[in-house]
Amino acid sequence: MKLSENLEHAFNAQITLEFQASLVYRQLAIELDLMDLSGIARWFRAQADEEILHAHKFIDHVSDRDNHPRIGAVQAPVAEVGSVLDAFEAAFAHEQKVSESIRSLYRQAEAEGDLDSRPLLNWFLEEQIEEEATVSEIVGRVKMINEDGPGLLRLDEELGARLPVAPAEPR
C-alpha cells in the first residue's frame, strides 16, 4: 500500500532528521577527540553510524511502499562543547527531538489509518526509549564524576569499549 503524499513527506522529513542526528554525533565525536577522550569519541562515532542505519530503515520503508525516499537539506550541527557533560546533554536533547518526531510521525500514520507503518514505528518508539535511557544514564554518571580526571578516564575507557556499528548494506 502506497503512502499518502503527506505521509511520504513526513517519512522523508524523518529520514533527513536521522542523517542530521548522525552529523550531530559525528561533530560531538570530533569535540571529544579534541579533549583527548578518544574512547568517548568512539562511542559518539558508533552512535553516528547507528543513526545512518536508522535513516536506511526509513528509506527502505518508503521505497518498499512504492514511494520516493528523499533526503532533505541537512543542517550542519552546531555542537561546540566545553565539557563532556555539555556533549552528552547535547546528545540527550537531540535524542528527545528525534523521539518527538517519531511520535508525531506515529500519530500522523494513525490518523491516516496507515496500519502498514505500525511495525516500523513501534520498533522506533522502543529504540528511542532505549536511546534516551542510555544517554540519560551517561549524563547522570558524568554529573557524578563532576569533571574528575580519573573518573572521566574510566568513563572514556568504558565507553570506548563499545563495538563499532556495522555499516548499512545496500539492498
Image (cartoon, rainbow, N blue to C red):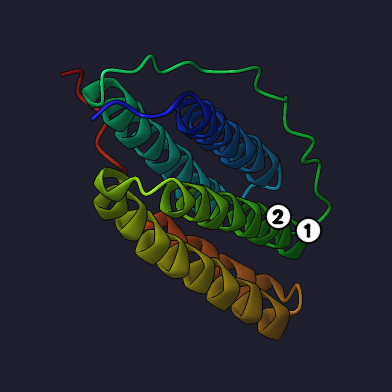
The one nearer the camera, 54 or 79, is 54
The 10 Å Cα crowd at callout 2, few under 14, some 14 to 19, many 20 or more, is: many
* Residue 89: image location, x then y, percent: 72, 62
- Identity of the amino acid at label 1? Ser
The residue lying at 77 percent from left, 41 percent from top is 79
The relative height of residue 20 versus residue 149 in the rendered view (above or below) is: above
Q: Answer with left or right where residue 134 lies relative to residue 1.
A: right
The relative height of residue 171 versus residue 16 in the rendered view (above or below) is: above
The one nearer the camera, 48 or 126, is 126
Q: How many marks?
A: 2
Callout 1: SS: loop
Check disc 1 and report the residue beneath it.
Answer: 83
Check disc 2 and report the residue beneath it.
Answer: 87
The residue lying at 57 percent from left, 35 percent from top is 17
Q: Answer with left or right where residue 6 lies relative to residue 57.
A: right
The one nearer the camera, 96 or 153, is 96
Is the N terminus in the top left, top right, bottom left or bottom right quadrant?
top left
* Residue 120: image location, x then y, percent: 29, 48
- Identity of the amino acid at label 2? Ala
* Residue 26: image location, x then y, percent: 57, 35
| Residue contact between numbered discs 1 and 2, judged by CB atoms under 8 Å | yes
The 10 Å Cα crowd at callout 1, few under 14, some 14 to 19, many 20 or more, is: some
Res. 159 image quadrant: bottom left
Callout 2: SS: helix
* Residue 150: image location, x then y, percent: 62, 74
Q: Answer with left or right where residue 76 lies relative to residue 41.
A: right
